[in-house]
Amino acid sequence: MKALETCRIDGLACTVHPAGENAVVCCHGLYSNKESRKYIEMAERAVRAGLSCVRFDFSGCGESGGDFSYELEDRVKDLEKIMEYASRRFGRGHFALLGSSFGGMTALRYAAKNEVLATVIMSTPYLVRFGSYETDVLADAEQCSHVLIMHGTRDELVPPAHASTLYERVQEPKKMLLFDTDHSFSDEIERSRALDKALRWILEHME
């Protein structure tokens, strides 16, 4: 894999795997970070396929500064900053999003209002509640197409029914796949299968 580039975008820690104008941007879950195996392994696959990959930490997570937030709107603002950077970095390239759990919700909300050629979400709920804060992405999903939804049948945090609900809302082309694994896709074989499917979906819709 080509040499990594690291940078900070308005306090957000970012790792770039450069390979071409088209890029995959990875959105981690609520308490996760850009060093999750999913995103490192996705970056390896993307680069081999000629796609660049951007991994970053949301505010207050991993190596990023700022305050941690449970609010989806704050996560979307972070993603907007990264996408603006990616647009400058890769010029006229096209973009895909890979998001897991709360990162999947972030990806859907962004994709509902912005041009994204493909979106892949893993272990993603359609609704979350944190204390008095509650939000859902059902209306956002209705504005999204070219979405691949992947979920573990043994997800201990988000029931697979959430995947089915999101699948019903997103527009064609769309696909839903289930895997014999948990919320984090910690089973290496199933995670590898899922990431292979994700890359195939992204490449198919990048053209």
Image (cartoon, grey):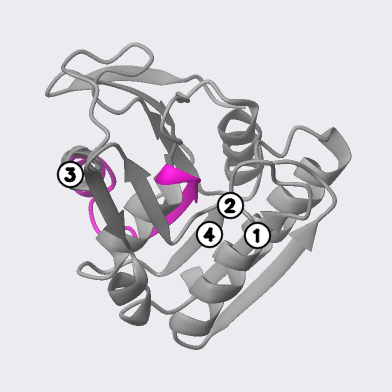
Look at label 3 and name its amino acid: Arg
Residue 88 — which label? 3
Look at label 2 and name its amino acid: Met
Discs 1, 2 touching: Cβ within 8 Å: yes
Q: What span is colored magenta in the figure?
A: 82-102
Discs 4, 2 touching: Cβ within 8 Å: yes
Q: CA distance from mark 1 to mark 3?
A: 30 Å
> Within 10 Å of the Cα at label 4, are there few (<14), some (14-19), or many (20+) other Cα atoms?
many
Query: In the rendered structure, which disc, 1 or 3, sits on the residue that comes first in sequence?
Result: 3
Q: Residue 197, how many percent across, how many down?
A: 72, 60
Q: Residue 201, how many percent across, how many down?
A: 62, 67
Residue 130 — which label? none
Q: Residue at x 49, y 40 (%)?
A: 19
Look at label 1 and name its amino acid: Met
Discs 4, 1 touching: Cβ within 8 Å: yes
Q: Does the rendering let one see residue 136?
A: yes
Q: CA distance from mark 4 to mark 1?
A: 8 Å
Residue 154 as seen in the image, left or right of residue 159: right
Of the two numbered discs 1 and 3 in the rendering, the one whose residue sits closer to the viewer: 1
